[in-house]
Amino acid sequence: FATWGRDDGYGKEDLYLTTREGNGWSTPVNLGPTVNSDGSDTHPYVTPDGERLFLTSTRLRSPADTSDNWNHYVIRTDAVPALRTALQ
């Protein structure tokens, strides 16, 4: 899930992971700097095979980017320790 303004964040909005534990949920874990940037990182989707994470971000990666741009990114889940552990 995405959230705004947590103390352990890297930017404006960060992506976190939580898993079902009994009748509740685990403590949220920030997905870290491989996923989160100094911009807004939102709209996560893990592919059904669990191999890729798609997300939308305002991170600035090229001279053409502005903070108004929302770009799509794909990250292999094995590059994100919290996801790798959760998907095993």
Image (tube, rainbow, N blue to C red):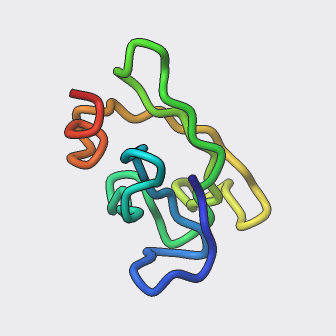
State which quadrant residue 65 falls in: bottom right
Q: Residue at x 57, y 41 (%)?
A: 44
**Relative depth, front residue between 10 and 46:** 46
Please tell me which residue is depicted at 41% across the width and 26% down the height of the picture. 52
Q: Nearer the viewer, residue 1 or 60?
A: 1
Dividing the picture into quadrants, the one containing residue 80 is top left
Give the answer, above or below, for where 79 lies relative to 67: above
Which residue sits furthest right?
A: 68
Res 4 quadrant in image: bottom right
Residue at left offset 39%, top offset 35% = 75
From the viewer's perspective, is 41 left or right of 10?
A: right
Q: Position of residue 7 (x, y in %)?
A: 45, 87
In the rendered image, the residue lying farthest to the front is 23
Position in image of residue 82 (x %, y %): 26, 48
Q: Find residue 49 and report its horizontal and vertical position in percent.
A: 39, 12
63 to the left or right of 53: right
- Residue 84 shown left or right of residue 54 in the figure: left
Question: Which image quarter is the C terminus in?
Answer: top left
